[in-house]
Image: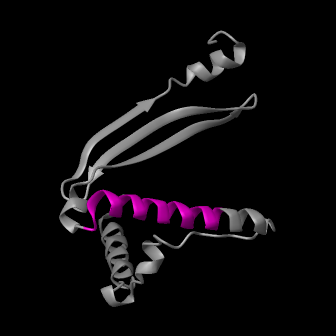
């Protein structure tokens, strides 16, 4: 009555056939701009506020020029010196707007160079109960 062996085998064969039909992407088909958009800020004008888009695009360009100039001044354009420079990459996650305040939920920072990769990694989480205590006024 519970003869599910052939049925399972049929399903497994069907799954493997479906898998074989998936289109595989060759290296020639991958456009690097799609995945590596460095130097190309994403600008959306769906909200109709073109001023902010222009502001962020110009800020992106000025920040990029400032970092480029600082690196070149520090290393005199020497590739080996650039590889040894240490960079910091920080990311902050927030709990969102709590009574007009944007509270930090997580902070992470990676220190890396182009020769060795990540040299040091630091991350910290804020206890989520602290947000509810802040709402009650007991944390301050």
Quadrant location of the C terminus?
A: top right
Drawn side of residue 80 relative to residue 137, left or right: left
Residue at image x 31%, y 56%? 74
Residue at image x 39%, y 80%? 18
Most extreme residue toward the bottom is 28
Confirm whether the magenta stretch covers residue 14.
Answer: no
Confirm whether the magenta stretch covers residue 64.
Answer: yes
- The stretch in magenta equals 56-77
Most extreme residue toward the right is 48
In the rendered view, would you say 18 is above or below 89? below
Drawn side of residue 99 relative to residue 67, left or right: right
Q: In which quarter of the image is residue 69?
A: bottom left
- Of residue 62 and residue 24, the one placed in the foreground of this image is 62
Decide if residue 75 is in sight here.
yes
Q: In which quarter of the image is residue 42?
A: bottom right
Residue 62 in the image: state x and y as whole percent: 55, 64
Q: Main secondary structure of the magenta part?
A: helix
Quadrant location of the N terminus?
A: bottom left
Residue 131 in the image: state x and y as whole percent: 62, 23
In the rendered view, would you say 116 is above or below 39? above
- Of residue 40 and residue 25, the one placed in the foreground of this image is 40
Residue at image x 58%, y 37%? 94
Residue 104 in the image: state x and y as whole percent: 56, 33
Q: In which quarter of the image is residue 139?
A: top right
């Amino acid at each position: 009555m519970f003869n599910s062996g052939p049925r399972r085998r049929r399903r497994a064969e069907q799954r493997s056939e479906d898998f074989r039909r998936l289109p595989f992407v060759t290296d020639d088909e991958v456009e690097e701009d799609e995945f590596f958009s460095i130097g190309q800020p994403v600008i959306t004008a769906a909200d109709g506020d073109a001023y902010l888009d222009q502001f962020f695009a110009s800020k992106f360009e000025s920040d990029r020029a400032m970092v480029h100039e600082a690196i070149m001044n520090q290393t005199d354009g020497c590739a080996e010196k650039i590889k040894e420079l240490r960079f910091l990459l920080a990311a902050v996650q927030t709990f969102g707007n709590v009574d007009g305040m944007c509270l930090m939920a997580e902070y992470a920072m990676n220190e890396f160079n182009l020769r060795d990769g990540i040299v040091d990694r630091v991350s910290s989480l804020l206890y989520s109960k602290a947000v509810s205590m802040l709402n009650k006024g007991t944390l301050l």
